[in-house]
Amino acid sequence: MIAIGGTIGTGLFLGSGESIHQAGPFILVIYLITGAFIFLMMRALGELLLSDTNSIIFVDFIKKYLGRRTGFIMGWTYWLGWLIIAMSELIAVGTYMQFWFPNIPIWIWEIIFLGMLYLINIVAVSAFGETEFWFALIKIIAIIAIIVTAIVMVCLQTKTSRGTVQIANLWRFGFSSGKHQEIIASFQMAFFSFLGVEFVGVSAAETKDPLKNIPHSINSVITRILIFYIGALAAIMIIQPWMDYSAGKSPFVQVFAGIGIKAAAGIINFVVLTAAASSLNSSLFTTGRMLFSLAPSRSYFAHLNQHQIPMRAITLSTILVVFVVLVNFLFPENAFKMITSVASAAFLIIYIFLMLAHIFYRRSTDFLQGAQRFPLPGAPYTDYLTIIFMLLILLILLVMPTTTVTTLITLGWFLIIYLISYRVIPRKL
């Protein structure tokens, strides 16, 4: 449940507002295309996980098949990627709170929520799993409720302040915005919405029967994409015409506020707020433990306190997340876009190297002489197609004016961590 809920976050609940505004209902096609390649990436991950059930983190496979240096670079980049995801969730928290308190600056709410979640992570960590389970359940129930609401309103031909609720709302105002540059740019936010999906496979690998649970969990990704992404976005655009959605606000809140049901809008805003808070909580939990595991043994951050919590690593991760408050203060209109583009660029490169690791695995004796469980359909051609697709999104990030600088900053990170690797790992490796 945590893994499923973890894939439904700010990209869908907040970022999709900008995507709908840019692409219109054509965003459904964009999500389908992006989801198809994400599924292929997950199948490649599943095959790797089943080739060695003792390795439950995909960075281990990158290290094994592409070298220790590449594994080092991707491991630290994965930690950075989750830090940036935490920043995007924090921006979302502040944005959602303005629904009720429009006159209070976003950064104040960001500081308050980050402080509370930091305390939870260092004091009440034993309740983490139980809390995240219920937060995930709230997200899933809310999305299903919105889909069911749309179906009922269509069947009853419900009339709202925006007209009659009908399936034709998806195309009767035009199936796209007609702005080709903005439609292409929407691929970035669609990709961002799927970040963290690899946790579904990793979580299944940690169960008692990974040989059964990994294939089941990964194959069900298609169903989740169709229900939680395509179904949810189609539902809100059926209830309210797509032109009424604006960037920077949750479309799931706008849909009910737009048709005059303020109480429902408030409830949904509470749901997306808890969703963002839970994702932020998960990110702090994850980044703290990743930093602890990545840090050299006996170093300052490779330390557990008396409660066996990596408090130093969690503290540093939290301090770094605080920097997004400054970004939000300096760039109040573009902060979310900037942060998500950095995360997208980082994860694009990580996923590309995951596909490369799968290609090299297929050429290794591990595959040729192994059991060959759960093979990726169409490999290695589907590997190459997935890599090409991700390179195209990276190119989109580079050429779009709003994301060029942040993408170059991300590429600069890779240069820095590559140079650092030579201080940590001998050249012969």
Image (cartoon, rainbow, N blue to C red):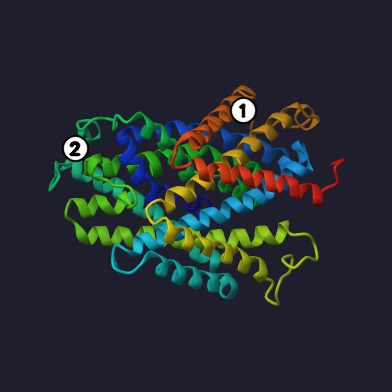
Residue 228 seen in the current view: yes
Horizontal arrangement in the rendering, residue 205 relative to residue 191 (left or right): right
Tell me: residue 204, above or below residue 126: above
Q: Residue at x 67, y 32 (%)?
A: 356
- Residue 340 position, x and y percent, is 48, 48
Number of other residues with Cα within 10 Å of mark 1, as a class: few under 14, some 14 to 19, many 20 or more? many
The span from disc 2 to disc 1 (Cα, nearest Å) is: 40 Å
Q: Which residue is mark 2?
A: 166
Horizontal arrangement in the rendering, residue 276 relative to residue 205 (left or right): left
Check disc 2 and give the amino acid type.
Answer: Gln
Tell me: residue 65, above or below residue 343: above
Number of other residues with Cα within 10 Å of mark 2, as a class: few under 14, some 14 to 19, many 20 or more? many
Circle 1 SS class: helix
Residue sitting nearer the eye, 140 or 252: 252
Residue 26: image quadrant is top left
Quick one: quadrant of the C terminus? top right
Q: Find residue 383 and name its label.
A: 1
Residue 275 seen in the current view: no
Q: Residue at x 61, y 39 (%)?
A: 349
Circle 2 SS class: loop
Q: Residue at x 46, y 45 (%)?
A: 193
Of callouts 2 and 1, which one flags the residue occurring earlier in the amino acid sequence?
A: 2
- Residue 69 position, x and y percent, is 77, 43
Q: Residue at x 29, y 68 (%)?
A: 103
